[in-house]
Amino acid sequence: EMYKARWGIEVFFRWIKQNLNVPVLFGSTKNAVFNQLFAALMTYVVLRWLYDHSKSLIIACKSMPLIRFKELMQENQFQAEWLIAVTKILDKYVYFSRLDIPKVG
């Protein structure tokens, strides 16, 4: 049972290193580790959300995997189609966030 529990933790940290770009933990305290993992997870969630919403605006032949999307985002090297799709998604949500919604009650 202990081995299975430890293996689950190892698999979790391998996923973090691969998907959240956290090759090493900078702090050793519980709070430092929590903050670094939380920031990495939030970044992943935002990128994943942006990728999923933008992908729906891209034709199939111009599609790319999430890992490539993250790399191109980091390098600021998007193709025009992806840049337009990401811009449309962000513009849409910025517009909705600025609407004056009347309060109920």
Image (spheres, rainbow, N blue to C red):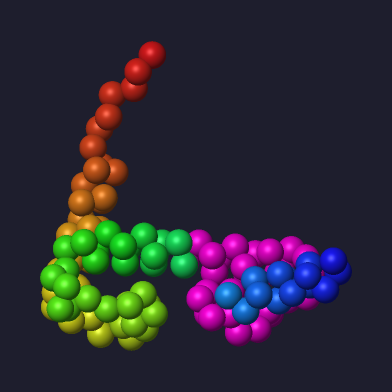
Question: Where, by quadrant of the figure, is residue 104 drawn?
Answer: top left
Magenta stretch holds residue 78? no
Q: Nearer the viewer, residue 29 or 6?
A: 6
Q: Residue at x 34, y 82 (%)?
A: 68
Q: Residue at x 59, y 74 (%)?
A: 16
What is the chief secondary structure element of the magenta stretch?
helix
Q: Is residue 50 above or below residue 81?
A: above
Q: Is residue 73 visible?
A: no
The quarter of the rendered structure image containing the N terminus is: bottom right
Report whether 59 appears left or right of 9.
left
Magenta stretch holds residue 23? yes
Q: Read off the magenta span.
A: 16-43
Report whether 17 appears left or right of 82.
right
Report whether 92 appears left or right of 97.
left
Question: Where, by quadrant of the figure, is residue 74 drawn?
Answer: bottom left
Q: Residue at x 71, y 76 (%)?
A: 10
Q: Is residue 16 visible?
A: yes
Report whether 67 appears left or right of 62.
right
Where residue 22 appears, as percent x and y from the top left, is 58, 79
